[in-house]
Amino acid sequence: MGEVIFDTVLDGVKLLPFLFLTYLAMEFLEHKTSDKTKRAVKRSGKAGPLIGAVLGAFPQCGFSTAASNLYAGRVITLGTLIAIYLSTSDEMLPVFLSEQVSIVLILELIAIKVVIGAVMGFLIDFVIRKSVKNEDMVSKIGHICDHDHCHCEKSIVKSALRHTITIFAYIIIISFALNTVIHLVGEDALANLILNKPVIGPIICGIVGLIPNCAASVVLTQLYIGGVVSLGSMMAGLLAGSGVGLIVLFKENRDIKENFKILGILYLIGVVCGILMDFII
């Protein structure tokens, strides 16, 4: 057990500089582009799902929350909202970069999420054919800040450091739990719990992805890197996940039944796409 603790801490410490540099770049991008991104989505019109899917793929703190507000005010369509949710990867990018995962793989996964988001968004808008705008209802867009995820710091260094410490803590806890289980039951036995069940894996990971917290994407990404879940299972969770966007949606959108329908749509798309990926790849 002492070796497990030592390896966990050592591996975590090695990630710190990569995590900090990644979040520093992400914070810079957020501060420079967040307002422009929101304006681009508001003006996207019928091309909303495509623009939303592309912009949602960029690592911007709180973009899914802004999308939730825009939809609550009917400034964007349901298809655009779903496209943004599906393309958002939350903490996948910094964790992958800190673990030095192949850039080619990262870009491929981001591209897959963008394509799925855009296609599903257009399909939903085509089926519903409903786009109502009401600018007055979204006067508070950009003012909602989730204090567990986006701290609205003026200093990008301070904000990057805060994010780094938070995600580092998640990684240490998850890695320690994973290493402990592997030490006790064996890596092969652990992998067989999910990897040999391609349908069950995405179903379970899709539920994990719906948890409105950055820890969900960290868990899914770390489990994939550790070989515990398949690529399709991880993608099922990441597609279904939208960070804290769902919390804001339930808070700002008064139609509770619609909110649960959106939740179901995200989960269904994530699980189906994850299952298909496991069979195709």
Image: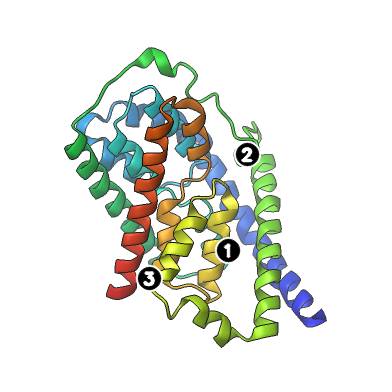
* Residue 1 picture location, percent across and down: 79, 81
Numbered disc total: 3
Label 2 is placed on what type of residue?
Ile
Vertical relation: 98 (above or below) 68: below
Dot 2 and dot 3 residues touching (CB under 8 Å): no
Dot 1 falls on a residue whose secondary structure is helix
Vertical relation: 159 (above or below) 269: above
> What's the distance in space between the residues labelled 2 and 3, CA to CA?
41 Å
Dot 3 falls on a residue whose secondary structure is loop
Label 2 vs 1, first from the N-terminus: 1
**Mark 2 against mark 1, which lies toward the viewer?**
1
Task: Tell me where residue 188 sits by quadrant.
Answer: bottom right
- Residue for badge 3: 199
Task: Tell me where residue 40 sits by quadrant.
Answer: top left
Instruction: Choose between 138 and 36: the one closer to the eye.
Output: 138
Residue 98 disc label: 1
* Residue 219 picture location, percent across and down: 57, 61
